Image (cartoon, rainbow, N blue to C red):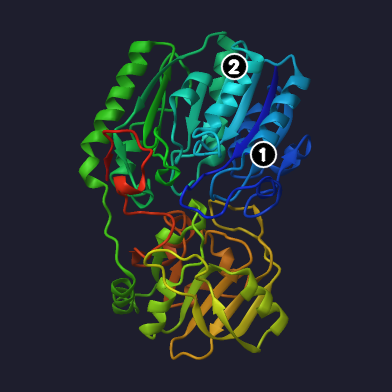
Amino acid sequence: MKIAVAGFQHETNRFSPYPTTLFDFEREDGWPGLTSGHSIFDVFPSMNIPLGGFLNFAKGRYEVVPILWASAEPGGLVEDAAFDVISERILDEIQASLPLDGIYLDLHGAMVTQSHEDGEGELLARLRARFGEAIPIAVSLDLHTNVTTQMKSKADVITIFRTYPHLDMAKTGFRAGVLLDQILTSGHRPHCEFRKLPLLVPLQSQCTDLEPTRSIYQHLTDAQSLDTVHADVAMGFPPSDIAENGPAIVAYSYSEPVALEKADQIEREFLLSENKFPYPLYREDEGVRLAKENIGGGLPVLLADIQDNSGAGATSDTTGLLHSLVEHGVKNCAIAAIHDSSVVELAHSTGIGEEFSGSLGGKHKGDGFAPPYQGKFKVAALSDGRFEFHGEMMKGSIANIGPTAALELADQKAEILVVVTSERIQCLDQALFLHLGINPLEKSILAIKSTVHFRADYGSISDPIILIESPGLNPCQLSSDMLPRLRPGVRIL
């Protein structure tokens, strides 16, 4: 059988000031750049990416036609030009590959474009408009997808990540292959029981290592046969701010009553957990004081700057937590990462061991946002920003984020090392410190710009973990006022 495969990924944050352009999809960052044709076979099978998992399932089973795979760092609305160019390439190259027995798409599920609230649904609608209903389409989605009615109706089967941090990305693509194979073998499409839940869960409360999300995900099933049932849950991505925002359930079976029963079970468990989601958040000063009180336990104390997470589309350049750490005179502290290309350029021109004065971060002006940090910096280390990830989530992937620098605050009693990057990147892997010669385990306090993904590589080496509510563009204290497009009747947790 002949299967076409493609990927098109973006997690869109309407609060972000950065529009997402075609260049953002073409270039490398923490993920590969736009990859097409047979290069896909060289890049993805060894990676923890859904397409890699699908390719590993398909090897020896299908004739796989590789189309393209493109991803951009989470940010603002995807420009129509970028969406149309990549979508048309996918459609045209699938057209050139006909006849086909099936299509697999590695999508995210929270893409919003200038013209389309539901980017993935629009792509699927274009596929159906051109190729009709005859070709089965399997889709894998991120846990933070806002599954829409259109996605459900245009795809024959959807699989969704079941871990946050996302450790099962490749496994999710593999599961999509299993289900597509069952459809192709049987010649029948399964019934889908779809539920959109009337809740909105902030990102920090979606972690599947913690309750109540952990228990909800234990109710999911991994069908070896669609004669039983295959069910998945999406947690949603609130900063997308679309009408169909929030958690959803999909249950697939050749038996409609079986799918209905499974969806009912998961929905009951989810709704009974509604009051268990909130996690404590601390403002900067309170969190830093708490961190200082807990130094000496054998592991670094970790402060998570959860609202300035570039992995959710934030600017990654806020300085509220940095200012507080300086004011409290913390010792033996390291921060990763503040995005400021001009400061990195100045550090590289100054040289290791030398000092310069400058203004760090704080480029985005917003209500409650701290100003840039003004001070003198000593250049501790420099890098070209190309390094290998080693943590479980990203292991084997190569980052290419442009020049980076590690800077010491040279004019303060506080002892703080700041990792500064040319491009935005979430600190979800110790490699962001290690590639600059900084050993996180040797620090008393780590300050990380990440919401949950950091737990995969830092959870075992830090204690306690303190979530900081410093102003940023990944809002984790949600309200209806900030989400004007959300459908009526949704309860915000």
**Where is 186 relative to 212, above or below?**
above
Q: Which residue is mark 2?
A: 136
Q: CA distance from mark 2 to mark 1?
A: 28 Å
Q: How many marks?
A: 2
The one nearer the camera, 25 or 15, is 15
Of the numbered discs 2 and 1, the one sitting upstream in the chain is: 1
Locate the C terminus by quadrant. Answer: top left
Residue type highlighted by circle 2: Pro
Q: In the drawing, what numbered circle is on residue 81?
A: 1
**Where is 72 relative to 257, above or below?**
below
Task: Residue 408: tell me if it is visible.
Answer: yes
Task: Residue 177: tell me if it is visible.
Answer: no
Which residue is pictured at 47% across the width and 38% down the height? 161
Residue 9, by quadrant, is top right
**Where is 290 relative to 60, above or below?**
below
Residue 231 falls left or right of residue 112: left
Q: In the drawing, what numbered circle is on residue 311?
A: none
Residue 176 falls left or right of residue 444: right
User: For the residue labelled by badge 2, is the local secondary structure a helix, a strand or a loop?
Assistant: loop
Q: Residue 96, percent across and down?
A: 78, 21
Q: Residue 441, percent across and down?
A: 48, 73
- Tell me the mark number nearer the camera, choosing from 2 and 1: 1
Locate the N terminus by quadrant. Answer: top right
Label 1 crowd bin: few (<14), some (14–19), many (20+), radius 10 Å: few
Residue type highlighted by circle 1: Ala
Residue 472 falls left or right of residue 79: left
Q: Residue 420, percent across and down?
A: 58, 71
